[in-house]
Amino acid sequence: MHSDNEITPEMVRDSKIYQQWGLTDAEYQLIVDTLDRLPNYTETGIFSGMWSEHVSYKKSKPILRHFWSTNERVLQGPGEGAGILDIGDNQAVVFKAESHNHPSFVEPYEGAATGVGGILRDIFSMGAQPIAVLDSLRFGELDNAHTRHIVDGVIAGIAGYGNAIGIPTVGGEIGFDPVYAGNPLVNVMAVGLMDQKGMQVGQAKGVGNSIIYVGAKTGRDGINGASFASAEFSTEHESDRSAVQVGDPFLEKLVMDATLQAVRDHSDIIVGIQDMGAAGLLSSSSEMASKAGMGIDLDLNQVPQRETAMTPYELMLSESQERMLFVVKKGEEQVILDLFKKANLDAVIIGHVTDDGRYRLRFNDQVVADVPVDFLTHAPKQDLPMVAPKRLAILKADQFVPDVTDLKQTVLDLVGQPTIASKSNLFRHFDSQVRADTVIKPGGDAALVRIRGTKKALAMTTDVNARYLYLNPKVGAKMAVAEAARNIVATGATPIGITDGLNFGSPDNPEVYYELSQAVDGINDLAKQLNTPIISGNVSLYNETDGQAIYPTPMIGMVGLLTDVSKATRIGFQNVGDSIYIIGETNASFNGTEIQKMQAGDIDGQLFDLNDHDEITNQKLILAATDQSLLASVHDLSEGGLIVGLLESAFAGQFSFNVVIDMTAEFLFAETPSRFIVSVAPQNREAFEALAGDSAKKIGEVSAEDQMTIQSSDQLLQLSRQETQTIYQESISWRLKG
Amino acid sequence: MRAAVIRFPGSNCDFDMLYALQDFGIDAEIISADNNDLNGFDAVFLPGGFAYGDYLRTGAIAKFSPIMAAVIQAANDGKLVVGVCNGFQILTEAGLLPGQLQVNKVPGFICEDVELLIENPNTAFTNAYETESIMIPIAHGEGNYYADDATLAQLEDNHQIVFRYAQNPNGSAHDIAGIMNERGNVFGMMPHPERAVDPVTGNVDGQPFFKSILSEIIAGD
């Protein structure tokens, strides 16, 4: 067997070029032993793609398999394009997150744009209409010109793709810390809605059924992006190519609409659908065959190509965007081909399902690869060593003590911190309202999207405070889940499921591997208690620059269900004279907080605790009060503590407040978890207090004038709403101007 | 009383417009831009989106689509022709409305609620409004209205300016948010009234827009 290029199997072996594609000597030898011959160039290439961490999860799988992913709602757990949950009325919600960290650093606009495109394909390949996108972004500090360039590009890229395809960007969060300067994080979560009868899976069942290639033509973009490009080994052609793909939202909209129409009208003849993501045609086709226990036979000359003289290796490992693979019943292909042709899209039969369990590729009438499907799709797992990071052993138990000598200035400085300040001047570039279903837009605790034709709505959020994880990976991960759930609950919705985006450094570093393991334990622990199974997710490892890893950053994407959208609650105060209550205890929780970062320059010390029982009890109280429509506003407390929560509720509603707390002033900045502030109209006060008992403490009233006051046990704080809000609102824009 | 919502490849507010019309009891349906016949329709709506990707100047490709001859015919027949956002851009490209929509003065897509002043309350699109200013969302990167001075003077003199921005978000000449032709049957605006009709989304300032059109169509029957 020979590929069409001049590199023989012996040359592959002797030059060890497979190493540059990411295969180890042991993995190469395993391939040789299993095939009982030397793999050729193309075969070596496809093993390198399929056995890359990005595709195989060979390093993270031993940890990820611990994720709890089943309960009464789960219709589809991890392993498909996206997870699916039952939301009643024969409807289902589909969601998943994906990272595009590295491409977004190299080429911010296209990296972020194709991140949106990729996750949307995961959703509609399940047969679901995408209804919303959220972005979880992390950048370095804005005092760095290169970081500002990345921020501008990423925001424009998300806007350029999401706005054009017409799926609203309804939420997410943006954080800044120097650890992300060389490794920005771009995690995109997409949510879809479907009728349960329209569920599709990526499987290639039925001998003789046809494999149909749909969508954009294949080019040389992103070749082996899942492994990594190798200049030494590239042909002259390849070395000039960007490793980052280029997105075309218009084309993707055509593919999306046609795919959903095919699912709607022809589900009886569609056997499986899979999007071509990482490792492109290779991973989509081989995984579909593997999941069905079948083989597959492809004729690569049939693959639509937009460049000339592409080799089998390039065709299989290209990551050109906006492509899908369908498996359609034999003899019924024409109706699908016609449907896509009508939308001016390529749709071509490129092969068929076999029963011999082989992955066979043909090119120019030669067999250029012939390997066992299951072997190709099951990379040898790696159990890696783990050890607790040294830094964790030497963290001091004492909590940081904020300096509140100039309390007013401290507050004004805090609301201007990029992590705290309003992100609305960035989010305004995203179309948050297209489809006309957005009930709560960006700027709330969670976004809320109604389901037209029902009383239901879906709440959705992304959250993680990586500083907490840096000080305690397990508790910090629990806090991320807790905060996501509080954000969902603050809209009145009940949390129902999780997708994650696990962003970590190199797993080959035992300390990083420990962080990953601990974070997964923490997520699992609280997810079980909240009955929010982890139904999908993404892993992004090797987020390091010059040996410096990012903070462990497991983004938690959570979805909630609100059965009666008329009961939705928002963060903004609603009426003068409403009473303000705090729910949950405030403790000296200062290590890892925004105030510590701002005043001490860095975070340090042992992380404060999360009380699981309080967390769940307080969330249940909010849901009970919302169900009885007792609350005028609800806001969870997180970064920046009580002071920031009060200010945000004031700004959102354009009201002020007069508050008295029986604590000293520094506790305004404590980030003790499990807390909310709510406002309650006078007529509901009695009923609310009866329901809440000791869990809620009245701290003040909503007022109309510009002045906002807080009397603590040792200081009186007076702030002008206009002055404070201007800093909160404009700080990011000021910093972006450099 | 039937309304057509034109779906160009890349339109993405077609269903939003359809649902809004249907919510007001208008018999509306989506018509592909591949069609070339709009007979039997009393009103034609060109929705928002990115027709044909809008990789060139917005609306520059859409004006060549088969449906446009029928849209022009409908306009000439005095039927209501309404373009929102991308639809407005297409109507100016097709010459049914004067002027051009350019890239926003500060380049970049903007999505937010903006205050509109109802400049001419006596139109088929505003007659049901009882206030002088409303909040309607915008969502565009190319909404900066341009026309030469003579055209602007004409628009002012003939009261063809229907909506103005209270605070100009995109650099539009004379703060123009929406205009109609001299005859008053062809209308285009950048903001999205179809996103402001349902109380659940928190804004119903678009409702009188559709009520105005509804009464106009009924009156025309």
Image: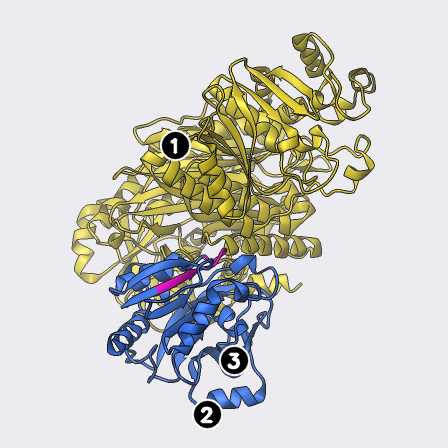
Image coords of residue A121 (percent x, y)? 50, 41
Q: Which chain is blue?
A: B
User: Outermost residue, bottom direction?
Assistant: B157
Q: Quadrant of residue A621?
A: top left
Q: Chain of mark 2?
A: B
Image coords of residue A276 (percent x, y)? 56, 35
**Residue identified by numbered label 3:** B98
Q: Please tell me how crowded label 1 is: few (under 14), some (14-19), or many (20+) other residues with Cα within 10 Å.
A: many
Q: Secondary structure at mark 2?
A: helix
Q: Please tell me how crowded label 2 is: few (under 14), some (14-19), or many (20+) other residues with Cα within 10 Å.
A: few
Q: Which mark is residue A527?
A: 1
Q: Disc 3 versus disc 1: distance between alpha carbons?
A: 58 Å
**Given the image, on which type of amino acid does mark 2 rest?**
Asp
- Classify B141 as above or below B129: above
Q: Which residues are magenta?
A: B4-11
Q: Depth-wise, is mark 3 or mark 2 nearer the camera?
A: 3
Q: Which chain is yellow?
A: A
Q: Secondary structure at mark 1?
A: helix
Q: Chain of mark 1?
A: A
Q: Please tell me how crowded label 3 is: few (under 14), some (14-19), or many (20+) other residues with Cα within 10 Å.
A: some
> Does A619 sit left or right of A202 as displayed?
left
- Magenta-colored stretch includes residue B10: yes
Q: Disc 2 versus disc 1: distance between alpha carbons?
A: 65 Å
Q: Depth-wise, is mark 3 or mark 1 nearer the camera?
A: 3
Q: Disc 3 versus disc 2: distance between alpha carbons?
A: 14 Å
Q: Nearer the viewer, residue A260 or A349?
A: A349
